[in-house]
Image: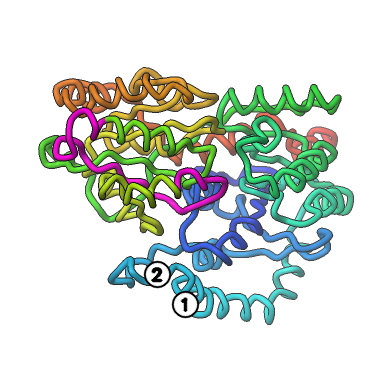
Amino acid sequence: MDVSSSSDGFRIWIEVDDFIRYFDWSVTPTGIGRVQAQILPWLVDAYPGRVLLCRVGAGGEQVEVLSYEEVARLTDGNEFLHRQKTRRWPVSLLKVKRYLGTRLTAAVKARLGNTNGRQRFASMIREGDVLLNLGASWSHRDFGKAIAFLKARYGVRFGLLVHDVLPVSHPHLVAPGHIPNFTKWLHDMTGVWDLVLTPSQSSAEALANYLGEQNLPVPDTRVIPFGAGFPTNLPRPDLPLEHRSHVLYVSTIEIRKNHMLLFRVWEKLVDRHGAGAVPQLVFAGKFGWEIADLRRALNTSKSLDGKIRVIENLSDEELASYYRNSLFTVFPSFCEGWGLPVSESLYYGRYCIASSATSLPEVGGRFIDYHEPGDTEGAYELIEAAIFNPDLVADKEQIIRQEYPCPTWQQTALSIVATLDGYFPDPQRKQQAFAR
């Protein structure tokens, strides 16, 4: 869908270095990577010739122009996963095979041809263009210095999507090694950003609160809610409730996601109702950090004798199947910047029981039920009711099907460009007006 026109002014350069480098060590994306994977194709499709992709190197002196096809080839693990006939393959072997087979070939080609890519950027960039990063640019060493160089050299403006500020707002729930780098990056960004986008009002307020505490200037900020769902080859028709088998929790398995609360809930459910009456709880996500207590509980109990199952490295189609086959979903996270699995659950018509923390009420609205993240008993009551009262879940699903205004990634992409157009003046139009 091309919505651009010949009167469009400044170009929008999407900086994708962090998005590409994430796949050096991972086959499938987590939240931030998934957001980028959904937004980029809509932006490129809707604004051909106006939205361009680039990769900023060290210091900002090396910027390579990339096609969407090149970026997609470096960041799509789904085709690779489809070729695997079993999940018994070691993850490390999957990564090595993928890296050597696809990424290494592309990387060699990039090294051979990146001089042309850099020359293209220098010839195409114009004063007043907007450079936009949608990802995790703190992984780019000296990103602030690189952006400052590009702004000074080419006269570009810089926009940044800040997904969350959890490493500084909730440092006790974040991997300790990540906090210093993130803090430095955030402080560096205050010297270069012109406009900040966030997915939620909660994230915008957390950013403003932190900067205020640090006596740093608060940038102009606009909230751009994210879309829901992801494209697959599977149809979305519903399955009857009686044909579904499990309760689903989609997230990285880390301390912030509060998996221990669910372990305690399922332990209590089995104790009260018997294992045969309790559905399996599926953790769909990679093992992360600060979860020694959870690992110990799972190992000691043999995953509650099979009542809890952990599945890693699902393709989009496999994940969609797990959503469709779920009785309902859960999301007891302590804190979020948005909460994609909640909107994904609603996208697939599935009732969700989530924590009421931070941004999650913005995502789920009146279509899901909430408990405090530390309230195990409150979570237990909601989950027990959903398991043993199928009419309750059926009623919730009917409301979701009939009334949930499912947001699309196309809307997110269009909102981003509309926000940039509304905020940044078009230098070409200024020059034309001055010439008159």
x, y (%) of residue 407? 41, 32
Image position of 111 with respect to 384: above or below: below
**Given the image, on which type of amino acid does mark 1 rest?**
Lys
Residue at the image point whose x is 40% and y is 24% from the top: 376
Q: Which residue is mark 1?
A: 97
- The reply to whether dot 2 and dot 1 touch (C-beta < 8 Å) is yes
Residue 290 is one of the magenta-drawn residues: yes
The picture places residue 126, in percent across and down from the top left corner, at 78, 52
* Quarter residue 209 falls in: top right
> Residue 418, image x and y in percent?
59, 33
| Residue highlighted by disc 2 | 80
**Quadrant in the picture for residue 81:** bottom left
Judge the density around disc 1: few (<14), some (14-19), many (≥20) Cα neighbours within 10 Å: some
- Viewer-nearest residue: 385 or 367: 385
Position of residue 197 in the picture relative to residue 378 (left or right): right
Give the number of the mark in front: 2 or 1: 1
Q: Left or right? Give the position of 5 relative to 57.
A: left
Compared to residue 320, the image places residue 202 above or below, namely above
Q: CA distance from mark 2 to mark 1?
A: 9 Å
SS for callout 2 = helix
Number of numbered discs? 2
Residue at x 58%, y 23% (from the top left corner): 201
Q: Crowdedness of circle 2 by 10 Å Cα count: few (<14), some, many (20+)?
A: some
The reply to whether residue 74 is in sight is yes
